[in-house]
Image: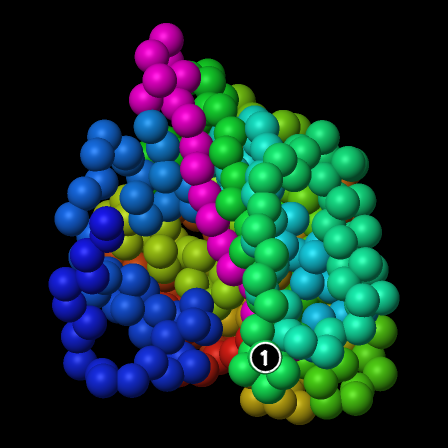
Amino acid sequence: MLDICEVRKMREISLAEGAGGAEMGELIRSLRYGNRGKWGNLYDDSATLKLGGGVRLAFTTDSYTVTPIFFPGGDIGKIAACGTINDLAVMGAKPLGMSVALVLEEGLPKADLERIIKSLDSVSRSTGVPVVTGDTKVMEKGKIDGMIVNTSGVGLIRKDGTLDRRPKAGDKVLVSGGLGEHAVAILAKRFGYRCGVRSDAKPLIGEVDAVRGLVRLAKDITRGGLAAASNELCGRHGIGMLFDEADIPVRPSVRKVCEMLGADPLELACEGRLICVVPREKAATALARLKMFNPRSSVIGEITRGRGVAVDTFLGRRTIPPPRGRIVPRIC
Ligand code: MG
């Protein structure tokens, strides 16, 4: 049985600790599990286990508490399938199968549940990643908000396909499309804005396969946005990143909603975008391949010898710290 030894500082959990920023990282690090066996990549998108012959098993899990459960461009079922498939794909794994566990609120319309399962199933079919096991629980009305979905997934990483290699100074940093669209689609629905932005939720298997062999490492950009993903990679590998603000792709409509709400598009969640690090001489090829999936794909900067993330803006250079605070709760 897993033993949680220490939860530091606060006596009660806050929403900030689920928002993908620094507080979430601190909470996760404070949960000390005694037995990790021979597993590696414990704080990566998937944990890995050597199977022999240069092959590793990848294993990941994620829970989804988004509100509202239906939003422009997707629903909780679509992001639950995409999220787990993407956490496997960005490690270089070929996803083999996934589980779906549902916690449903008494009174949830069955038509809503059917729509969500259909949506999840459509991602499963289009990617060839079957749902092979699952669980269903129901809680009393008012005890949860509609539904919670958990998905877990397993995949295999072959030696020549791994995407968790160490970056080098001078490597280029790419993103696979416009940022913040998932979060803004949900915020717009919550606040009743008609901005036309749809969630970017999508499986990233195609993108990963297109740049495999060119890319040293990849990571899907989810809660906490580019700010969280880039700082996490810098911390893990002891590197720095320097971006050029003019090259960071953010749709004008996303920018406008962010201005209205005082949000930073670099901190907003995506559900179908990745950041990847590519040797300088392979960057143009990788970019051309990513543009086949999304024309907003861009080379946004490079790896530096420093520590942490910075961006050059028209006003000068500024640091991008790991996001803190509530950012946007209940976004995925
Ligand atoms: Mg991830």
In the rendering, at what x and y percent does residue 183 appear?
Answer: 64, 71
Q: Determine the residue positioned at 17% across, 81% down.
A: 9
The quarter of the picture where residue 58 lies is top left
Residue occupied by mark 1: 140
Mark 1 lies on a secondary structure that is loop
The quarter of the picture where residue 286 lies is top right
Of residue 131 and residue 211, the one placed in the foreground of this image is 131
Q: In this view, does 191 lie to the left or right of 58?
A: right
Of residue 51 and residue 219, the one placed in the foreground of this image is 51
Q: In this view, does 71 lie to the left or right of 175?
A: right
Q: In this view, does 176 lie to the left or right of 197?
A: left
Quick check: is 65 in the magenta stretch?
Answer: yes
In the rendering, at what x and y percent does residue 48 appear?
Answer: 36, 32
Give the answer, above or below, for where 200 lies relative to 289. Answer: below
Q: Determine the residue positioned at 42% across, 26% down.
A: 57
Q: Is residue 104 visible?
A: yes
Quick check: is 244 in the magenta stretch?
Answer: no
Q: Determine the residue positioned at 42% across, 56% down.
A: 230
Q: What stretch is highlighted in magenta?
A: 50-67
